[in-house]
Protein backbone atom coordinates (compact mmCIF):
# COMPACT_ATOMS: atom_id res chain seq x y z
CA UNK A 1 0.00 0.00 0.00
CA UNK A 2 1.30 3.45 -0.91
CA UNK A 3 2.03 5.69 2.06
CA UNK A 4 1.26 8.80 0.11
CA UNK A 5 -1.79 9.85 -1.91
CA UNK A 6 -2.44 12.84 -4.17
CA UNK A 7 -5.81 14.46 -3.54
CA UNK A 8 -5.46 16.88 -6.45
CA UNK A 9 -6.23 14.73 -9.49
CA UNK A 10 -6.62 15.70 -13.15
CA UNK A 11 -10.43 15.85 -13.03
CA UNK A 12 -10.36 18.21 -10.09
CA UNK A 13 -7.61 20.31 -11.67
CA UNK A 14 -9.73 20.90 -14.78
CA UNK A 15 -12.54 22.34 -12.65
CA UNK A 16 -10.55 24.58 -10.36
CA UNK A 17 -7.47 25.61 -12.37
CA UNK A 18 -8.46 29.26 -12.92
CA UNK A 19 -9.70 30.08 -9.40
CA UNK A 20 -6.67 28.27 -7.98
CA UNK A 21 -4.31 30.33 -10.14
CA UNK A 22 -5.98 33.59 -9.09
CA UNK A 23 -5.82 32.52 -5.44
CA UNK A 24 -2.13 31.63 -5.72
CA UNK A 25 -1.32 35.02 -7.28
CA UNK A 26 -3.26 36.89 -4.56
CA UNK A 27 -1.54 34.90 -1.78
CA UNK A 28 1.94 35.41 -3.25
CA UNK A 29 1.31 39.14 -3.71
CA UNK A 30 0.18 39.55 -0.11
CA UNK A 31 3.19 37.58 1.17
CA UNK A 32 5.52 39.78 -0.91
CA UNK A 33 3.95 43.00 0.44
CA UNK A 34 4.13 41.56 3.97
CA UNK A 35 7.85 40.87 3.54
CA UNK A 36 8.38 44.50 2.49
CA UNK A 37 6.36 45.74 5.49
CA UNK A 38 8.38 43.57 7.88
CA UNK A 39 11.67 44.83 6.41
CA UNK A 40 10.45 48.41 6.69
CA UNK A 41 9.32 47.92 10.30
CA UNK A 42 12.64 46.34 11.30
CA UNK A 43 14.53 49.22 9.68
CA UNK A 44 12.37 51.84 11.44
CA UNK A 45 12.82 50.07 14.78
CA UNK A 46 16.60 50.01 14.28
CA UNK A 47 16.66 53.70 13.42
CA UNK A 48 14.50 54.58 16.44
CA UNK A 49 16.66 52.63 18.88
CA UNK A 50 19.83 54.11 17.37
CA UNK A 51 18.37 57.61 17.76
CA UNK A 52 17.43 56.85 21.38
CA UNK A 53 20.95 55.67 22.13
CA UNK A 54 22.39 58.89 20.71
CA UNK A 55 19.99 61.14 22.68
CA UNK A 56 21.56 62.26 25.98
CA UNK A 57 19.72 60.56 28.82
CA UNK A 58 20.38 63.09 31.60
CA UNK A 59 21.15 66.79 31.79
CA UNK A 60 24.67 65.90 32.99
CA UNK A 61 25.34 64.15 29.65
CA UNK A 62 23.95 66.99 27.60
CA UNK A 63 26.54 69.17 25.85
CA UNK A 64 26.32 72.81 26.95
CA UNK B 1 -13.37 50.98 41.70
CA UNK B 2 -9.99 50.53 40.00
CA UNK B 3 -9.34 47.05 38.64
CA UNK B 4 -6.16 45.34 39.74
CA UNK B 5 -3.45 45.13 37.05
CA UNK B 6 -3.65 41.36 36.41
CA UNK B 7 -7.47 41.57 36.16
CA UNK B 8 -7.25 44.35 33.60
CA UNK B 9 -4.68 42.38 31.60
CA UNK B 10 -6.75 39.20 31.50
CA UNK B 11 -10.06 40.93 30.86
CA UNK B 12 -9.09 41.70 27.26
CA UNK B 13 -8.22 38.02 26.80
CA UNK B 14 -11.59 36.81 28.07
CA UNK B 15 -13.53 39.47 26.15
CA UNK B 16 -11.83 38.41 22.94
CA UNK B 17 -12.22 34.75 23.86
CA UNK B 18 -15.94 35.32 23.26
CA UNK B 19 -15.41 37.47 20.12
CA UNK B 20 -13.13 34.77 18.69
CA UNK B 21 -15.66 32.09 19.63
CA UNK B 22 -18.46 33.97 17.85
CA UNK B 23 -16.27 34.58 14.79
CA UNK B 24 -15.45 30.89 14.35
CA UNK B 25 -19.03 29.75 15.02
CA UNK B 26 -20.31 32.06 12.26
CA UNK B 27 -17.53 31.06 9.82
CA UNK B 28 -17.69 27.29 10.37
CA UNK B 29 -21.47 27.32 10.33
CA UNK B 30 -21.33 28.89 6.84
CA UNK B 31 -18.48 26.59 5.73
CA UNK B 32 -20.39 23.55 7.01
CA UNK B 33 -23.38 24.54 4.93
CA UNK B 34 -21.22 25.16 1.83
CA UNK B 35 -19.31 21.90 2.24
CA UNK B 36 -22.66 20.15 2.16
CA UNK B 37 -22.75 21.07 -1.53
CA UNK B 38 -20.26 18.80 -3.34
CA UNK B 39 -19.36 21.41 -6.00
CA UNK B 40 -17.77 23.52 -3.27
CA UNK B 41 -16.30 20.68 -1.27
CA UNK B 42 -12.68 21.10 -2.32
CA UNK B 43 -12.17 24.72 -3.37
CA UNK B 44 -14.26 26.62 -0.78
CA UNK B 45 -12.29 25.59 2.34
CA UNK B 46 -9.05 26.42 0.50
CA UNK B 47 -10.36 29.86 -0.50
CA UNK B 48 -11.50 30.35 3.10
CA UNK B 49 -8.10 29.43 4.54
CA UNK B 50 -6.29 31.69 2.07
CA UNK B 51 -8.51 34.73 2.35
CA UNK B 52 -9.15 34.53 6.08
CA UNK B 53 -5.52 33.86 7.13
CA UNK B 54 -3.18 35.53 4.63
CA UNK B 55 -4.55 39.14 4.51
CA UNK B 56 -4.28 39.43 8.29
CA UNK B 57 -0.72 40.70 7.89
CA UNK B 58 -1.89 43.65 5.77
CA UNK B 59 -4.88 44.38 8.01
CA UNK B 60 -2.56 44.06 11.01
CA UNK B 61 -0.05 46.50 9.53
CA UNK B 62 -2.86 48.98 8.81
CA UNK B 63 -4.23 48.51 12.33
CA UNK B 64 -0.77 49.16 13.83
CA UNK B 65 -0.64 52.51 12.02
CA UNK B 66 -4.29 53.49 12.63
CA UNK B 67 -5.17 52.51 16.21
CA UNK B 68 -8.43 54.50 16.11
CA UNK B 69 -9.84 52.23 13.42
CA UNK B 70 -11.75 49.45 15.22
CA UNK B 71 -11.32 46.36 13.09
CA UNK B 72 -13.27 44.41 15.69
CA UNK B 73 -16.49 46.25 14.86
CA UNK B 74 -15.77 46.21 11.12
CA UNK B 75 -15.17 42.46 11.33
CA UNK B 76 -18.42 41.76 13.16
CA UNK B 77 -20.39 43.87 10.65
CA UNK B 78 -18.80 41.92 7.78
CA UNK B 79 -19.50 38.55 9.43
CA UNK B 80 -23.11 39.54 9.99
CA UNK B 81 -23.45 40.86 6.41
CA UNK B 82 -21.85 37.72 4.97
CA UNK B 83 -24.35 35.52 6.82
CA UNK B 84 -27.17 37.47 5.14
CA UNK B 85 -25.45 37.26 1.74
CA UNK B 86 -25.46 33.46 2.04
CA UNK B 87 -29.26 33.68 1.83
CA UNK B 88 -28.94 34.69 -1.84
CA UNK B 89 -28.99 31.95 -4.47
CA UNK B 90 -26.21 31.12 -6.95
CA UNK B 91 -22.49 30.36 -6.97
CA UNK B 92 -21.42 34.00 -7.49
CA UNK B 93 -23.43 35.16 -4.47
CA UNK B 94 -21.94 32.32 -2.40
CA UNK B 95 -18.41 33.28 -3.48
CA UNK B 96 -18.97 36.96 -2.63
CA UNK B 97 -20.45 35.96 0.73
CA UNK B 98 -17.44 33.73 1.40
CA UNK B 99 -14.97 36.54 0.59
CA UNK B 100 -16.83 38.97 2.88
CA UNK B 101 -16.88 36.29 5.59
CA UNK B 102 -13.11 35.78 5.25
CA UNK B 103 -12.33 39.51 5.51
CA UNK B 104 -14.64 39.78 8.52
CA UNK B 105 -12.86 36.85 10.15
CA UNK B 106 -9.47 38.44 9.46
CA UNK B 107 -10.54 41.80 10.94
CA UNK B 108 -11.81 40.39 14.26
CA UNK B 109 -8.69 38.23 14.62
CA UNK B 110 -6.34 41.17 14.03
CA UNK B 111 -8.16 43.37 16.53
CA UNK B 112 -8.13 40.58 19.08
CA UNK B 113 -4.39 40.26 18.71
CA UNK B 114 -3.85 44.03 18.91
CA UNK B 115 -5.94 44.40 22.07
CA UNK B 116 -4.63 41.36 23.92
CA UNK B 117 -0.97 41.98 23.05
CA UNK B 118 -0.97 45.72 23.76
CA UNK B 119 -2.71 45.36 27.12
CA UNK B 120 -0.69 42.31 28.19
CA UNK B 121 2.35 44.06 29.71
CA UNK B 122 4.55 41.37 28.21
CA UNK B 123 2.49 38.40 29.43
CA UNK B 124 1.29 35.62 27.14
CA UNK B 125 -1.90 34.66 28.95
CA UNK B 126 -4.27 37.28 27.41
CA UNK B 127 -3.41 36.40 23.80
CA UNK B 128 -3.42 32.68 24.66
CA UNK B 129 -6.93 32.93 26.12
CA UNK B 130 -8.07 34.93 23.09
CA UNK B 131 -6.62 32.34 20.67
CA UNK B 132 -8.14 29.40 22.56
CA UNK B 133 -11.69 30.68 21.99
CA UNK B 134 -11.37 29.72 18.33
CA UNK B 135 -11.18 25.96 18.97
CA UNK B 136 -14.48 25.99 20.86
CA UNK B 137 -16.02 28.11 18.10
CA UNK B 138 -14.88 25.82 15.27
CA UNK B 139 -16.51 22.71 16.74
CA UNK B 140 -19.66 24.59 17.80
CA UNK B 141 -20.05 26.05 14.29
CA UNK B 142 -19.53 22.64 12.68
CA UNK B 143 -22.11 21.00 14.90
CA UNK B 144 -24.67 23.78 14.42
CA UNK B 145 -24.23 23.57 10.63
CA UNK B 146 -25.66 20.05 10.78
CA UNK B 147 -28.86 21.27 12.45
CA UNK B 148 -31.85 22.95 10.81
CA UNK B 149 -30.86 26.36 12.20
CA UNK B 150 -31.37 29.07 9.53
CA UNK B 151 -28.24 31.02 8.54
CA UNK B 152 -29.76 34.42 9.37
CA UNK B 153 -29.47 33.45 13.05
CA UNK B 154 -25.69 33.71 12.56
CA UNK B 155 -26.12 37.31 11.35
CA UNK B 156 -27.73 38.15 14.70
CA UNK B 157 -25.28 35.99 16.68
CA UNK B 158 -22.29 37.89 15.21
CA UNK B 159 -23.73 41.14 16.59
CA UNK B 160 -23.81 39.76 20.16
CA UNK B 161 -20.04 40.26 20.29
CA UNK B 162 -20.27 44.05 19.80
CA UNK B 163 -20.38 44.92 23.54
CA UNK B 164 -17.35 42.69 24.10
CA UNK B 165 -15.37 44.50 21.39
CA UNK B 166 -16.35 47.89 22.82
CA UNK B 167 -15.32 46.88 26.34
CA UNK B 168 -12.00 45.53 25.11
CA UNK B 169 -11.31 48.86 23.38
CA UNK B 170 -11.00 50.43 26.86
CA UNK B 171 -8.12 48.09 27.62
CA UNK B 172 -6.44 48.95 24.34
CA UNK B 173 -6.86 52.72 24.84
CA UNK B 174 -5.46 52.41 28.37
CA UNK B 175 -2.50 50.37 27.14
CA UNK B 176 -1.80 52.73 24.24
CA UNK B 177 -1.14 55.56 26.71
CA UNK B 178 2.27 53.94 27.19
CA UNK B 179 4.81 54.94 24.54
CA UNK B 180 5.65 51.34 23.57
CA UNK B 181 2.98 48.98 24.96
CA UNK B 182 4.57 45.83 23.52
CA UNK B 183 8.14 46.63 24.57
CA UNK B 184 7.81 44.23 27.54
CA UNK B 185 7.75 41.27 25.12
CA UNK B 186 11.42 40.29 25.25
CA UNK B 187 11.47 36.57 24.66
CA UNK B 188 13.59 36.32 21.52
CA UNK B 189 17.30 35.61 21.91
CA UNK B 190 19.37 38.75 21.43
CA UNK B 191 22.14 36.68 19.88
CA UNK B 192 19.96 35.77 16.91
CA UNK B 193 19.21 38.42 14.24
CA UNK B 194 15.58 39.58 14.12
CA UNK B 195 15.12 38.31 10.55
CA UNK B 196 16.27 34.82 11.59
CA UNK B 197 13.87 34.83 14.57
CA UNK B 198 11.01 35.75 12.24
CA UNK B 199 11.89 33.05 9.72
CA UNK B 200 12.29 30.31 12.33
CA UNK B 201 9.13 31.33 14.24
CA UNK B 202 7.08 31.31 11.03
CA UNK B 203 8.59 27.94 10.13
CA UNK B 204 7.48 26.57 13.51
CA UNK B 205 3.95 27.88 12.85
CA UNK B 206 3.99 26.23 9.40
CA UNK B 207 5.04 22.93 10.96
CA UNK B 208 2.37 23.22 13.66
CA UNK B 209 -0.26 24.07 11.05
CA UNK B 210 0.64 20.99 9.03
CA UNK B 211 0.86 18.73 12.07
CA UNK B 212 -2.57 19.89 13.27
CA UNK B 213 -4.07 17.91 10.40
CA UNK B 214 -1.53 15.09 10.40
CA UNK B 215 -2.01 13.97 13.99
CA UNK B 216 -3.12 10.32 13.92
CA UNK B 217 -6.59 10.15 15.51
CA UNK B 218 -8.13 6.85 14.47
CA UNK B 219 -10.00 6.89 17.80
CA UNK B 220 -12.09 9.90 16.71
CA UNK B 221 -15.32 8.27 15.60
CA UNK B 222 -18.17 9.95 17.48
CA UNK B 223 -19.32 13.56 17.79
CA UNK B 224 -18.40 13.59 21.48
CA UNK B 225 -14.85 12.45 20.66
CA UNK B 226 -14.53 15.21 18.06
CA UNK B 227 -15.76 17.75 20.61
CA UNK B 228 -13.20 16.47 23.13
CA UNK B 229 -10.42 16.87 20.53
CA UNK B 230 -11.28 20.55 20.03
CA UNK B 231 -11.67 21.12 23.77
CA UNK B 232 -8.17 19.67 24.29
CA UNK B 233 -6.83 22.05 21.62
CA UNK B 234 -8.52 25.05 23.26
CA UNK B 235 -7.37 24.13 26.76
CA UNK B 236 -3.84 23.52 25.46
CA UNK B 237 -3.66 26.90 23.71
CA UNK B 238 -4.85 28.80 26.81
CA UNK B 239 -2.73 26.86 29.30
CA UNK B 240 0.37 27.34 27.13
CA UNK B 241 0.24 31.08 27.75
CA UNK B 242 -0.70 30.79 31.41
CA UNK B 243 2.08 28.28 32.13
CA UNK B 244 4.66 30.23 30.11
CA UNK B 245 3.96 33.31 32.25
CA UNK B 246 4.34 31.21 35.39
CA UNK B 247 7.31 28.97 34.58
CA UNK B 248 9.09 30.66 31.68
CA UNK B 249 8.59 30.77 27.93
CA UNK B 250 11.58 28.65 26.93
CA UNK B 251 10.89 25.98 29.52
CA UNK B 252 7.24 25.56 28.48
CA UNK B 253 7.99 25.77 24.74
CA UNK B 254 10.61 23.00 24.85
CA UNK B 255 8.73 20.88 27.39
CA UNK B 256 5.39 20.99 25.56
CA UNK B 257 6.88 20.22 22.14
CA UNK B 258 8.99 17.33 23.47
CA UNK B 259 6.24 15.94 25.72
CA UNK B 260 3.64 16.03 22.94
CA UNK B 261 5.58 13.69 20.64
CA UNK B 262 5.23 10.32 22.45
CA UNK B 263 1.59 11.00 23.33
CA UNK B 264 0.73 11.88 19.73
CA UNK B 265 2.56 8.88 18.26
CA UNK B 266 1.12 6.37 20.75
CA UNK B 267 -2.35 7.89 20.78
CA UNK B 268 -3.63 6.81 17.37
CA UNK B 269 -6.02 4.29 18.92
CA UNK B 270 -6.13 5.60 22.51
CA UNK B 271 -8.18 8.75 23.01
CA UNK B 272 -6.90 9.87 26.41
CA UNK B 273 -3.23 9.57 25.45
CA UNK B 274 -3.90 11.38 22.19
CA UNK B 275 -5.79 14.22 23.91
CA UNK B 276 -2.87 14.80 26.30
CA UNK B 277 -0.58 14.98 23.26
CA UNK B 278 -2.89 17.42 21.46
CA UNK B 279 -3.00 19.61 24.57
CA UNK B 280 0.80 19.75 24.87
CA UNK B 281 1.12 20.29 21.13
CA UNK B 282 -1.26 23.28 21.18
CA UNK B 283 0.68 25.03 23.97
CA UNK B 284 3.27 26.61 21.66
CA UNK B 285 0.63 28.70 19.88
CA UNK B 286 0.95 31.85 22.00
CA UNK B 287 4.71 31.36 22.37
CA UNK B 288 5.45 31.78 18.66
CA UNK B 289 3.26 34.88 18.62
CA UNK B 290 5.15 36.32 21.61
CA UNK B 291 8.46 35.62 19.84
CA UNK B 292 7.37 37.53 16.74
CA UNK B 293 6.10 40.45 18.84
CA UNK B 294 9.47 40.45 20.65
CA UNK B 295 11.24 41.34 17.40
CA UNK B 296 8.40 43.51 16.02
CA UNK B 297 7.23 45.33 19.18
CA UNK B 298 6.08 48.36 17.19
CA UNK B 299 3.86 46.23 14.96
CA UNK B 300 1.91 43.59 16.93
CA UNK B 301 -0.78 43.40 14.25
CA UNK B 302 1.79 42.66 11.57
CA UNK B 303 3.47 40.10 13.86
CA UNK B 304 0.14 38.33 14.35
CA UNK B 305 -0.40 38.38 10.58
CA UNK B 306 2.90 36.51 10.13
CA UNK B 307 1.61 33.67 12.29
CA UNK B 308 -1.58 33.39 10.25
CA UNK B 309 0.40 33.33 6.98
CA UNK B 310 2.44 30.50 8.53
CA UNK B 311 -0.76 28.72 9.49
CA UNK B 312 -2.05 28.95 5.92
CA UNK B 313 1.24 27.70 4.46
CA UNK B 314 1.14 24.80 6.92
CA UNK B 315 -2.44 23.80 6.16
CA UNK B 316 -2.36 24.34 2.36
CA UNK B 317 -0.51 21.05 1.58
CA UNK B 318 -3.31 18.98 3.13
CA UNK B 319 -5.57 20.03 0.27
CA UNK B 320 -3.20 18.41 -2.23
CA UNK B 321 -1.83 15.24 -0.65
CA UNK B 322 -1.92 13.11 2.46
CA UNK B 323 0.02 10.34 4.13
CA UNK B 324 -2.13 7.25 4.32
CA UNK B 325 -0.33 5.18 6.96
CA UNK B 326 0.32 5.76 10.65
CA UNK B 327 3.99 4.86 10.14
CA UNK B 328 4.57 7.57 7.51
CA UNK B 329 2.62 10.05 9.62
CA UNK B 330 4.67 9.14 12.68
CA UNK B 331 7.99 9.65 10.92
CA UNK B 332 6.88 13.05 9.57
CA UNK B 333 5.55 14.17 12.97
CA UNK B 334 8.73 13.07 14.78
CA UNK B 335 10.99 14.82 12.25
CA UNK B 336 8.96 18.04 12.31
CA UNK B 337 8.83 18.09 16.14
CA UNK B 338 12.60 17.72 16.28
CA UNK B 339 12.95 20.60 13.82
CA UNK B 340 10.65 22.78 15.98
CA UNK B 341 12.57 21.88 19.16
CA UNK B 342 15.91 22.87 17.63
CA UNK B 343 14.40 26.07 16.24
CA UNK B 344 12.86 27.07 19.56
CA UNK B 345 16.01 26.24 21.52
CA UNK B 346 17.93 28.64 19.28
CA UNK B 347 15.57 31.61 19.02
CA UNK B 348 14.06 31.78 22.53
CA UNK B 349 16.12 33.62 25.12
CA UNK B 350 16.99 32.02 28.44
CA UNK B 351 14.19 32.29 31.00
CA UNK B 352 14.55 34.85 33.72
CA UNK B 353 13.24 33.96 37.16
CA UNK B 354 9.84 35.67 37.21
CA UNK B 355 6.26 35.40 38.41
CA UNK B 356 6.95 32.26 40.46
Image: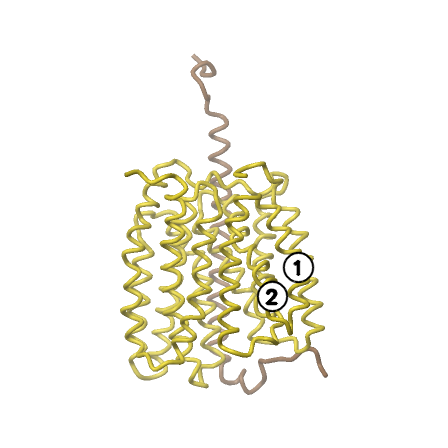
Q: Where residue A36 appears, x then y in whole percent?
A: 49, 52
Give residue B22's quadrant in the image.
bottom left
Chain designation of label 1: B
Furthest residue toward bottom? A11
Question: What residue is disc 2 on?
Answer: B211
N-terminal-most mark, 2 or 1: 2
Q: Where residue B160 appears, x then y in whole percent?
A: 28, 63
The crowd level at tag 2 (other Cα within 10 Å; few <14, some 14-19, many 20+) is many
Furthest residue toward front? B272
At x 68%, y 77%, the residue is: B325
* Chain letter of the brown region: A
| Numbered circle sitting on residue B337 | 1
Give residue B324's quadrant in the image.
bottom right
Furthest residue toward top? A64
Give the distance between the C-alpha atoms of the residues marked 2 and 1, in whole angstroms: 9 Å
Q: How many marks?
A: 2
Snapshot colouring: by chain
Q: Are marks 2 and 1 on the same chain?
A: yes
At x 50%, y 60%, the residue is: B309
Given residues B31 and B91, the one toward you in this image is B31
Q: What is the secondary structure assignment of the residue under circle 2?
A: helix
Chain designation of label 2: B
Of the 4 image quadrants, the one containing the C terminus of chain B is top right
| Numbered circle sitting on residue B34 | none
Look at the image and give the colour of chain B.
yellow
- Mark 2 and mark 1 in contact? Answer it, CB < 8 Å: yes
Q: In this rendering, would B133 be left or right of B200?
A: left
Given residues B111 and B353, the one toward you in this image is B353
At x 47%, y 81%, the residue is: B41
Q: Where residue B281 appears, x then y in whole percent?
A: 59, 59
Q: In this rendering, would A60 be left or right of B157?
A: right
At x 28%, y 39%, the residue is: B1
Amino acid sequence: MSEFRWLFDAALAAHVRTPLLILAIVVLLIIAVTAVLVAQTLKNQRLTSAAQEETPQTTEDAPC
Amino acid sequence: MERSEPTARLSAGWLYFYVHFVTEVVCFFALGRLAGDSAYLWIMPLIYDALAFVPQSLIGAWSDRHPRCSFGLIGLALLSGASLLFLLQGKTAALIALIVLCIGNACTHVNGAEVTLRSAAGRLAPSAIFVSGGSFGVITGRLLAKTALPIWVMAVFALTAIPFVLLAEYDRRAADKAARPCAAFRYASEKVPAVAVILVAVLIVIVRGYMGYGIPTAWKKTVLQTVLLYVAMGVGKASGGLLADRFGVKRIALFSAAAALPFLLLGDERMLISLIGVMFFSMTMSITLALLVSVLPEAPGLAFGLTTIGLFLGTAPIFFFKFTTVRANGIIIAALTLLCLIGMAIIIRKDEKRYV
